[in-house]
Amino acid sequence: MLKQFSAFVWRRQQRRWLYGLLSVVTALSLWLGTPQPSQAISWIELLLRGVQIYQISNLSPRQEVQLGKQINQQLIESGRVELVSDRQINEYINQIGQRLAQYSDRPELPYTFQVVKDDSINAFATMGGFVYIHTGLIKAADNEAELASVVAHEIAHISRRHSVEQLRQRALAEGVLSAAGLEQSRAVQIGVELAYSRPNSRQDELEADQSGLEMLRQAGYAPSATIAFLEKLQRQGGSPPAFLSTHPATSDRIRALEREIDPAMANQGEGLNNQAYQAKIRSLL
């Protein structure tokens, strides 16, 4: 009797499991058979291929850092950037960057500051905390506060997730963002392209200016350096520096910053000693 009862229970459990499986398969078949917006490839196929997918709209900080590391690796391995090996310069730039980053909107990110061997006046950043400063920009600055104002601006792009939004917009424009998300290899490729093209919108730039200025002040640097550096670059003859050529209306940015700085407090803070700065970057001169 007990054996018959056990067999009955087992058959009943089997039927329940089978009905449940059939329901799942039916639901999947209906979903996969329905056209999905921007679905270049189904998530089930990507799963079967073992491809890592990023949900860009819900990218976690850990995923952002992971993606940033891969973009950084590609930039270096492809020869797009050549990093400076000078230990003193690297430590100096990292010291400035870490001092500023603790006052950013996302101080918990593991920020990485790297010096690029390039005489063009440029700086850029990519997601996950990676900031790149060209040697040409370091030499163009008169003092530490001016350099710090640029570093703060780039940190602000990261802390406001501008690179992540650019990645999403580019993937949508290219039609490679599916309902499942964005394939890892393509995400890295787009990230590398964006790192140098810097397609920041006017709103992004103004936002990074405001956030960067606040960072600069909280870190104890003189806020006047932000405007001083922009004005100096704007006055340069010939082709505009790369740092400005990819940014909108420098004069508008300067006016917006001037509204945020009290003239009486503009020079209060550190980093305005030109001679001390020249001594710090002597190996580049």
Image (cartoon, rainbow, N blue to C red):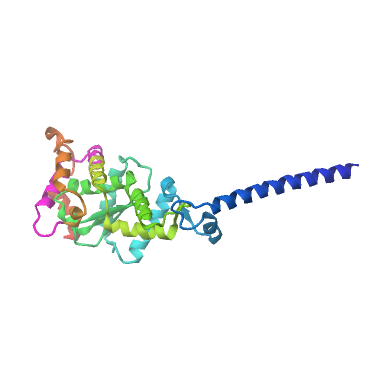
- Residue 261: which quarter of the image? top left
Q: Which residues are magenta?
A: 213-240
Q: Can residue 55 be seen in the rendering of this structure?
A: yes
Say which quadrant the N terminus sits in.
top right
Q: Position of residue 40 (x, y in %)?
A: 46, 57
Residue 173, position in %: x, y?
A: 35, 55
Give the residue at x 35% y 48%.
165
Q: Is residue 124 above or below residue 9?
A: below
Residue at the image position 17 percent from the left and 50 percent from the top:
277
Measuring from the top left, give residue 92's x and y in whole percent. Answer: 25, 52
Describe residue 24's horizontal placement relative to residue 246 as left or right: right
Number of dots carrying numbers: 0
Q: Is residue 281 visible?
A: no
Q: Does residue 264 belong to the magenta stretch? A: no
Asked whether, in this view, residue 60 is left or right of residue 193, the answer is right
In this view, the residue farthest toward the right is: 1
Give the dominant element type of the magenta stretch: helix, strand or loop.
helix
- On screen, residue 263 versus residue 7, left or right, reads left
In this view, the residue in front, 12 or 196, is 12
Point out residue 14 in the picture as x, y percentages from the top left corner. Answer: 75, 48
In this view of the protein, which residue sits in the foreground, 93 or 280? 93
* Residue appearing at x 56%, y 59% in the figure: 48
**Where is 237 relative to 157, above or below?**
below
Which residue is at 15% across, 44% downward? 252
Which quadrant is the C terminus positioned in? bottom left
* Up-down relation of residue 273 to residue 48 (above or below): above
Left or right for 52, reference 80: right
- Say which of 208 and 49 sits in front: 49
